[in-house]
Amino acid sequence: MSDRSLISAQNRSAEIEARIAVDPSTFRVLTGDRPTGRLHLGHYLATLRNRVRLQGLGVETMILVADYQVITDRDEIGSIADRVRDVVTDYLAIGIDPTRSTIFAHSAVPALNQLMLPFLSLVTDSELRRNPTVKAEHEATGGRPMSGLLLTYPVHQAADILFCKANLVPVGKDQLPHLEQTRVVARRFNERYAGGAQIFPSPDALLSESVNVLGVDGTKMSKSKRNTIDLAMTEDETAKQLKRAVTDSDRNITYDPENRPEVASLLLIASTLSGRDPVEIAAEIGDGGGGGLKKLVTEVVNEHLRPIRERRRELEADPGCVARILAEGNTRANEIADATLAEVREAMGMVYTA
Ligand code: TRP
């Protein structure tokens, strides 16, 4: 991703935010997660909060549990159903409202997956091999051979987005290549198979409102590194985990992201969740050192997550409710996908009736 295309995506995102404020009904958002485990504060600050905000603004939102994406690069997956239930429970706990947003799993939507076939015909293997996110994910597997699904998952992701004709996809920087791939697929489909008719829109990325924080070991927050603060943790577990957080030896707390990234990340967590300026929070802690900083962050995190955790416990006590909400979302996603696939087969001359 060049700096120039990143800046242009950022500018475009700002324009779109302004249009959402005027007329949210012109947008359909699709977002999603790989269900590899419980969601954590990193997810919450980078994307989940923003979904609740968009829902609140009245933007129609489709939320995908990308269960097929779990098997792109690993053998040991454990119980997918448990992971999916955890993620859906987290969504509902943070305030995703199933009467306004559709939560679904793409494996439960056959017509979505069938779109993958015509879409695969529109891309070349060298295009896929060049995808920087696929490359990075493959490298992270430490020498595993590239699976066919890992190589082609950006095309599957195009099906995730285009099956419902979403025109807006809130993403982090790492997902921008996939969005570009989706736009290419949409454009080529319209040209090659639909005689230029606009069957598929060209979706935009929405990069705004994302806050990136570090895990307690000072590296990217990630489940596999056990450095996360999970939405589902208790207050004691949160305190214990934050006690481990890496800081530095300077007792005087200052907000200096460049030179003190670990301290700055903790301040950013407190600042984002409390709506206060990080510089002001740092000044308040002053000579309190890492201990004072962690104490404050623990209080802010636990306070902010308290109602979310409360809802989460209620939902856990009623697994039938979570299952029903997902089943309803799947039904709705299937209706949309069936309609789109019918249109695609019509455009491609693949409707055979007696
Ligand atoms: N690849 C995304 C991730 O790892 C999850 C995802 C799957 C997704 N399909 C999508 C995101 C479609 C946006 C749009 O987080």
Image (spheres, rainbow, N blue to C red):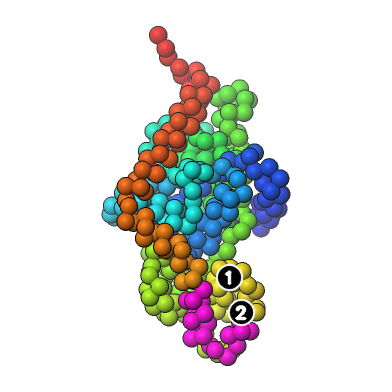
Q: Which of the labelled discs sits on residue 281, or is there none? A: 2
Q: Tell me which corner region of the image, top left, top right, bottom left or bottom right, holds residue 316.
A: bottom left
- Mark 1: give few (<14), some (14-19) or many (20+) Cα within 10 Å: some
Does the numbered disc 1 mark a residue whose Cβ is under 8 Å from ligand 1? no
Q: Circle 2 — which element?
A: helix
Of marks 1 and 2, which one's residue comes earlier in the chain? Answer: 1
The majority secondary structure of the magenta stretch comes to helix
The disc labelled 1 sits on which kind of residue?
Answer: Ser
- Mark 2: give few (<14), some (14-19) or many (20+) Cα within 10 Å: many
| Residue 258 included in the magenta stretch of the image | no
Q: Which residue is mark 1?
A: 274
Q: Quadrant of the C terminus?
A: top left
Q: Residue at x 58, y 54 (%)?
A: 53
The disc labelled 2 sits on which kind of residue?
Answer: Ile
Spot occupied by residue 216 in the image (x, y as percentages of width and height): 45, 74
Spot occupied by residue 15 in the image (x, y as percentages of width and height): 71, 49
Q: Going by the image, does 258 lie left or right of 109?
A: right
Q: Up-down: is 191 above or below 164?
A: above
